[in-house]
Image (tube, rainbow, N blue to C red):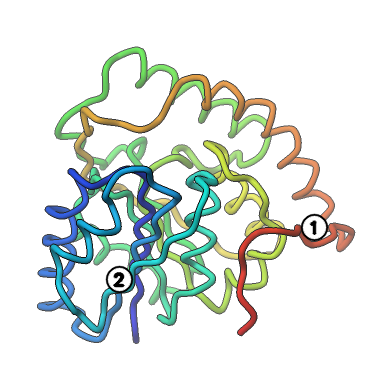
Amino acid sequence: MKLSVVVPAYNEADRLPPSLDRILSYLDEHHPSSEVLVVDDGSTDATVAVTRQHVGDRANLKVLSYSPNRGKGYAVRYGLARAEGELVLFSDADLSTPIEEMEKMLAAIDQGYDIVIGSRAHQLAEIRKRQPLYRELAGKFFNLVVRGMVLPDLHDTQCGFKLFRRSAIEPVLGYLRNDGFAFDVEILALGRAKGLKILEVPVVWVNSPMSRVRLSAATRAYFDLLDIRRRAQQLAAGALPAATGVGLPQR
């Protein structure tokens, strides 16, 4: 079963090369038919040039780029829509969750799940380096609100390590429109509204000291939750029109 790994990147010229080395080395050994899609989200640094120069001419690596910067949610959708694998893993560029953690997620897909998400809140998760306390508390509060408003059974929607069955998620992509911090909630909520089976699994996680998440963006996400809840309800009722301008190709 072919696997695609989507890595959204914005100004990641420094952090991306070592992460790609780890990803490609692991995939070469364990999943040789896989592909990696680096989605450059309108970077203003040398992310594209450094990535292409660092890895050379590899048939299983694609560097996708557009301008201007649109946001992480847009980048992930862009990559998901262009992935060719039957399974698609979204991973943050800093590899806070090691690539090896995908194996427990692949096992869950084999059990019939459509989306498997890495969780730092699971009691069996292994947090090797924690976030600063204010970020950790802010994240826990956000997830508490998410559970109260949208997804009551999921304890960590924001971990940047998620695996999708492509055939299951493709019908959802055309309804997604959130480009910001809440895009994870949106794809899970609308996936659930479409009847997709979602499982949360514990992962190893190491905080990156160069996190791109800004608290101002996280604050805006609280307002996004109201819109996501409304649209998930509409989608479940078959009354939600498709979004526009999401960068999805025609297959």
Among the 4 quarters of the image, the one containing residue 167: bottom right
The residue most toward the right is: 239
Residue 181 versus residue 31: which sits nearer the camera? 181
At which x and y percent is residue 199?
46, 57
Residue at x-position 30% and y-position 14%: 133
Residue annotated with mark 1:
235
The 10 Å Cα crowd at callout 1, few under 14, some 14 to 19, many 20 or more, is many
Indicate whether 26 appears above or below 74.
Answer: below
Marks 2 & 1, CB-CB < 8 Å contact:
no
The amino acid type found where label 1 is placed reads: Leu
Relative placement, left or right, of 34 versus 180 is left
Residue denoted by label 2:
36
Residue at the spot x=27%, y=45% of the render?
12
Q: Is residue 38 left or right of residue 141?
A: left
Residue 139 rendering spot, x and y as whole percentages? 43, 25
- Seen in the picture, residue 171 relative to 45 is either above or below; the reply is below
Q: Position of residue 210 (x, y in %)?
A: 24, 30
The secondary structure type at the circle numbered 1 is helix
User: Dot 2: what SS?
Assistant: strand
The amino acid beneath tag 2 is: Val
Please rate how many residues cluster around mark 2, counting C-alpha atoms within 10 Å: few if below 14, some from 14 to 19, many from 20: many
